[in-house]
Amino acid sequence: MWTRRRAVSLLAAGTALPLVLPGVALAAAPTDRRLVVVLLRGALDGLAAVPPWRDAKYAEVRQGLALDPPGSGDGVLDLDGYFGLHPALAPVHAHYAKGDLAVFQAVAGPYRDRSHFDAQDLMENGTTRPRGAADGWLNRALGTLPGGGHRLGLAVGQQVPLLLRGDVGVASWAPRNLPDAPPDFLTKLGLLWAGDPLFAPALAEGMRAQAMSDEVLGPAQPGAPRRGPALAALGEPVGKLLAAAGGPRIAVLEAYGWDTHSQQGKLTGRLATALEQLAGALDGLARGLGPAWDRTAIVAITEFGRTVAPNGTNGTDHGTATCAFLLGGAVKGGRVLADWPGLAPQNLYEGRDLRPTVDVRQILKGVLHDHMGVEIAALDRLVFPDSAGARPLSGLIRT
Amino acid sequence: MLDVSAIIAANRFGLGARPEEAGDVARDPQAWVRNQIYAPYVPPPLLADLPDAAEYTRQFLEARQQGGDGGVAEFLQRRIRQETLAAEIGARVQVAVQTREPFRERLVQFWSNHFTVSVQRPVVAPIAGAYERDAIRPHVFGRFADLLIAATRHQAMLFYLDNIGSVGPNSRAGQLGRRGINENHAREILELHTLGVGGGYTQNDVRELAKILTGWTVVTPPLARRSGLPESAVGMTRFAADAHEPGNKSLVGHTFNEGGESEGIAALQFLATHPATARHVATKLARHFVADDPPSAAVARLEKVYLETRGDLAAVSFAIVDLPEIWERPNTKVRAPGDLVIAAYRALDVKVTAGQLPGTMREMGQPVFAAPSPAGWPDRASDWVGPEAMLRRAEWAVAVSRRVRSPQSPEVLAGYAIGAVAPPAVRRAIAEADPAEGVALLLACAEFQRR
């Protein structure tokens, strides 16, 4: 019986790549802290996910999108008597009571235009302008951690998003249905690809990740399901990989479906469906991580928010500030952190959007420092270049 | 064995050589590409019997209307989606696999991706194929303005980017309280389809273009009732004058006088020939045909031809063939997954079975008509060579080699699939393996994975 581990070693021998031997690859990781970044692509409506239900203007400005106050059957799930959670986030709400969830409101990055694609580029490259870097802030942060050849970073999906691209080798992984290729074939292919600067390292990383996933989750089950796995179903297996002694420590998930220009809906509809998937994934992560949950922080961010008022088609257009979530056993949660700008017309950004009062980099820097031990100087200059003005929020992590 | 120029023509411009076209390509690679621009447009017979967008939009909208019982509506909608989508995907891939005009077909896919619609919006699923067929395909060697107008006004795009419900607040419908502007479509026209991000437009321009486009919609059952249209009009595109925001509009420094539907046509024509659009389109074409980060001289040449011809895409296509940079280096581009599968099927003369295709494309990471965002699929290697993705490419190559028996030996196949571009060691490995493994190595080798 062959294993992918064996194929990895054969490949490593054949390609003369700087591969770490498989035994080392699956040895204990150099840190027991886990960090998951969830990228909510498409611009989450922060006022729908985290309704400021006590704001005097809330029901008026949100019109048909306003949710009922807490207490009624379909009402907001209250957080702190002022803000609440959308009912579709009920599984996440349970973590708030346990003190594992911190919620941020009126958050934005340094970008102020309303292009998804530039804003996402900037959310991932960590600079203050689109295409300001060809690598991602999380990869640069990885570069400051003592990895010892261990693959700490894992992109969930086939590709590696910009956030995790860069000098430090990372894996990508997703459940799949193609039958395994014979190890002899992979060895021969490794030889053919040996000099290829793109393909050779990618294949080696892919085989390494698959070997690890076979070991932790069991071998893949080829079949032919008609659809790709839903986000919610990815949470638990990813949690298990992160929990494994030799597994990755930093993972990135991407969630889609937030660009709700029409039929956004209240309790049901496009947004509620996307929120349910997100809540399912987060809850699955908690289950899969098991005891490692206590050393985990999950941060969920989106590229910008949406207009305060509904547009003409029961949806919302591109806006500015939005919410963010920080969840995990390592998080000092049970609180909403917001310098609330209010929803009155004179308080809105450009008369239409929620005004940003917290820079998302402050949250990310706080987590990277307090949770992962990245030095402030590196955060200010390397991870988020020229960001000394965005001071890390401290006290987000239980020490 | 095809020489380097022939491989570039067949793979960079075409979709990978079919055995029977290798001779034509080899004789004069550049002429082989140019002849496809000269050739008169003939719609592919394989696409002739597929349904039209209005018909399926009508069925879909009426299923949605069916009173009270959401289950029935959902069932009908799903059936329409699944049946038509599978047939459309099968037909689209089959055309690409069989066509003798693969440069045209590559451009159909390029422009279809530039003007992305995605089945991630359920209403788009039954008509995504019709959209490509009717709005994109006839125009790839025509004028960009006509392509832009056809794409903007198609049902699939109006639904996908939400213009169908956008109502001018001061229009008659707006005054009756029927909601307001939706700026999604207008923003993506400026950012993705024409000027490009950084093309000099502001949030105010987005609003103004959205106002210009108010009234560009699709006839829904309520709209038909309201406007006294026959039931047969449901599903057709229509300019609804009562939803159009009245008054003059100012777009990127240019005033468009109140003119109902003609305002939108004039605005799109204006945008189509704007210098920022020339730059944006030239850059994307150069990225697709030259390299991920195309040399600025190549972009400038295409941009100049675009401006001089006011967006004549045949002239721009000739200019692409004339770019010396393309012919200097083979294999500068990593094949996107869809490109890879089609090239393999062409080389092996695979008869496409519609049932398997959607799954294969999804496993490979590029499901047909299902781009993740209005920006379409990316066009750089860094977006496609993830570790999991490359492992899947290897596994896919093995799976294809086990399923397909080619009458040709792997060595012969390699001669026209990768030709002189492949180093001797690669050709030797393919020739020395047993036939199935030889095919798998051919499909997986770095030379076949690129174009």
Image (tube, rainbow, N blue to C red):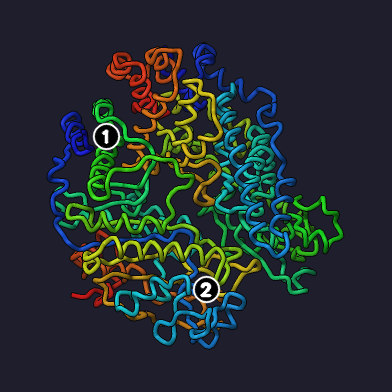
Q: The residue tagged with tag 1: helix, strand or loop?
A: helix
Residue A185: % across, % down: 28, 27
Q: In this view, does B199 lie to the left or right of A153?
A: right
Q: Which comes before the other along the chain, label 2 or label 1?
A: 1
Q: In this view, does B228 lie above or below B27?
A: below
Q: How crowded is mark 2: few (under 14 residues within 10 Å), some or many (20 or more)?
A: many
Q: In this view, does A53 lie above or below A388?
A: below
Disc 2 vs disc 1: Cβ atoms closer than 8 Å?
A: no
Question: Residue A200 — which label?
Answer: 1
Residue A352: % across, % down: 56, 74
**The numbered mark 2 sits on a residue in which chain?**
A
Residue pointed to by mark 2: A353
Q: Is residue A56 above or below residue B403?
A: below
Q: Is residue A341 above or below residue A181?
A: below
Residue A260: % across, % down: 55, 63
Quarter the N terminus of chain A occupies = top left
Quarter the C terminus of chain A occupies = bottom left
Residue A135: % across, % down: 31, 51
**The numbered mark 1 sits on a residue in which chain?**
A
Q: Is residue A237 left or right of residue A23?
A: right
- Nearer the observer: mark 2 or 1; the answer is 1
Nearer to the camera, B88 or A154: B88
Q: The residue tagged with tag 2: helix, strand or loop?
A: loop
Who's the residue at 42% across and 16% down the image? B413
Res B311 seen here:
yes
Q: What residue type is labelled 1?
A: Ala
Q: Which amino acid does label 2 sit on?
A: Asp
Who's the residue at 42% across and 35% down the image? B291
